[in-house]
Image (cartoon, coloured by chain):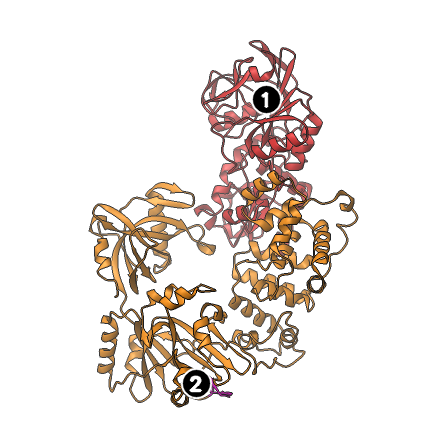
Chain colours: A red, B orange
Amino acid sequence: MQHPRYWINSNENGLYCEALDAYIDPVNPVHRAIITHGHADHARPGHGEVYATPETMAIMRIRYGDNHAEKQIELNYSDNISLRNASLMFKPAGHILGSAQAVIDHSDHRLVLSGDYKRSHDPTCAAFEVTQCDVFVSEATFGLPVFKHPPINQEVNKLLASLALFPERCHLVGVYALGKCQRVILALRELGYYKPIYIHGALAKLCELYSSYGIKLGDIIAVTEVENLNSLAGEIVLAPPSALNDRWSRKLPNVMTAMASGWMQIRARSKQRKAELPLIISDHCDWPELLQTLKQVNPQEVWVTHGREAALVHQAQLMGYQARSLSLIGRSDGNDDE
Amino acid sequence: MEAFAKLVDKLYFTSSNLAKSAILRDYLRTTSTPDKGWAIAAIAGTLHFDLFKRKLIKDLVSARVDPVLFDLSYDYVGEMSETVAHLWPTPSSKEDKETSKQLPSLDELVNSFKNCNKQQVEDILVELLDRMTADQRWALIKLGTRGLRIGLSARFLKKVLAEYANELPQNSVTTEDIERVWHGVEPPYLDLFDWLEGKADKPDVSKKITFQPVMLAHPIGPDELTQINSQCWQAEWKYDGIRVQLVCNENGKALFSRTGDDISGSFPDLLESIDEDNISGVFDGELLAMQEKQINSFNQLQQRLNKNKPSKKLMQEVPVGMMLYDALFIDGIDLREQVLRQRIFALTAWFKKQSIQPQLIKLLTLSEPLLFNNLQQLHALRDKANTSNSGFVEGLMLKNSNSLYVAGRPKGQWYKWKRDAKLVDAVIMYAQRGHGKRSSFYSDYTFGCWQDDKLLPIGKAYSGFTDDELKQIDKWIRNNTIGRFGPVKEVKKELVFEVAFDSVHHSKRHKSGVALRFPRIHRIRWDKPASEADQLTTLISMIAE
């Protein structure tokens, strides 16, 4: 019972680590859960014990209330905790605020579960830390060689250029409430955009949370507080993707619809979203980053979870690793970024 | 090439026509000929040759990308050009210095492909793809394989060209002006742009086989009807086929649709029956399913539409013919400045002359004006059209005998008096969002009629309601959704639409076995219980023979 394949398995609740007697990002309520980050398909309410970074725990409290789990155990990056007969440590994953890789040590073997992660620049969260291990469990949301995400500045500059070209149009940008929203705001600020940025009500609380962690988002105004909506012509408004082409956006003046997502690289996907201005901004690794990470972590074995597993498994084998797909149940099939 | 790639990328993602026009005109203003001519040809789909074959692209990428990874990627992206555009590996040696080097102009690019052998084509293509960004590769592959579809109609493009020309204060070019020369000019359109930009006269296309823009009719209203009299007005059956223009002279022959698309390929049987050495002119008329001058229903004709190379069998089963009702040119004489009375006189005389050798015009028929002396008789004719079960009469045409042949839809000249629409009460079953301005509204509806206690879908409609009604229906749909299939919402089977349509036909394609022609929402029956909507059998009894 040494090799991780003997103490990790998956069932209808999700991925289960026998050595820790805990589930990692389970889809159903369980007695003990390790939560890698706060996105809704990873963090769910109703568990007995939850182990997460303080930031992730704060996000869960915002989304699910203070009592989202009976016991909430916060674990800082690089701190150790022993559970049953293994030890658990979090390392930054660079995905969103508080996102972590779960590092599990048991009987001289180390398994690293990446959670969702990325390697590109993101000042809203701690950068991914390469951690040596025997088994590396990688996500594969963008696990196809067609995915090469451009630098975020290039994409945000597209938005600014459009704003200069169409100063009479309200630029409505679809962003996921957690992570993408704050990252886009920060990228705008880094490029010298200091005007107020207007947000849909659904984004407000998480923006406040980010601010409380010292992430300076600048002047943020809720659209509900704007008296004359026509004054939003020529301004940037952020909203969750579901609000882009719905009743909410009808009231905005002369809308230019933009969408910030890694999927925007594929034309048909952008069309589906009816995005006139697709911004390829992702909080996941693109294909070159996935390969770069495999090389740096250099594990003996690669397991691939949700996303386009087949391609990454094939590629890892080409690179000389033992690799297999770890089919997780209940994961969304990449219909959104979360 | 850089500018072209940027242009098609922008156009691809832009939905408003105003914005598309602005983008295109900006490109035309800042790009020189012949580059912009090639760009227009690529967008209009008028390039006559592939720069390279799709197969070559596939072979090249197979040699560079792992086949498993390629298949998985293609599977996901769903489209060859885009898959290749993203997958093409940039050689590391070229990464820094060469990608920054300028790409050839569109004209250099087209010519270098045109003037080289197979091996050179491959070399040039690889060299280009190596140096390009993904968006540029996509544009190149689409251009080279003539697969650029970015939602711009040929008509829209001509309108933009006219708008572009009229940016010069001395110009006054109409879309029709461009339409008149369009089929007589060739990519890269040097003569066209010289004219549009005020550097030369309009290109002379009189000897070419060119589409001429057609004259269209307005629907008639009760006020206009009172002005119709037998002295100044001519009545004809409004045939239910497709409007076509036959152009024929010693240089060739072609058949065009009313929008100027060359549809010769779909009707080789009709064109072969025309002897261009003996017939010269531009004729206006209706293409109909016709056997030995016997007209068949539109439903028959439908099998021939949009088939580029019809099989012999199909041509035998559904022969076609053309009903002539006007002439723009005969034997080199431009008749468009003459009044309808004179044109018809010329056309009839010409037709009689040809009838001496009937094989010359065996698939052509002359539309005979209908006789009437007063309004009462005209109403009687309309009643006849209304009750006709022929499947090829869709009403009456009323034409001012003194009308010149004016392109477009001039006022007070030609009227169509269609048959009364047929009506059926159907229940809305599914709804989908619209496009453009309507993308936040559920505006496309599928509705059905009863068969026993089950609803079977009979058609789809997205028009006929006012903006206010649309808002109400949209709200109703959101509150009454019971299921989702991707973008399609299933709704409670509770709301009845009175659906108007022109005719109903048998159809193997639909589960209900019927297909409606021009269905539109006539009224929303908020008051009517769904159980009282029509039975499918009611609809079947309305099918034209």
Q: For this view, does B391 lie left or right of residue A286?
A: left
| Residue interval drawn in magenta | B327-337
Residue A65 sits inside the magenta stretch: no
Of B316 and B224, nearer the camera is B316
Q: Position of residue B144 (x, y in %)?
A: 63, 58
Q: Position of residue B149 (x, y in %)?
A: 55, 58
Instruction: Say if labels 2 and 1 share a chain.
Output: no
The residues bearing labels 2 and 1 have C-alpha atoms spaced at a distance of 81 Å
- In the figure, residue A284 lies in which quadrant? top right
- Numbered-mark total: 2
Of B417 and B68, nearer the camera is B68
Q: For this view, does B502 lie left or right of residue A327?
A: left
- Which residue is under mark 1? A53
- In the figure, residue B380 lies in which quadrant? bottom left
Q: Amino acid at mark 1?
A: Thr
Above or below B91: residue B244: below
- Protein chain holding label 2: B
- Protein chain holding label 1: A
Q: Give the foreground label among 2 and 1.
A: 2
Mark seen at residue A97? none
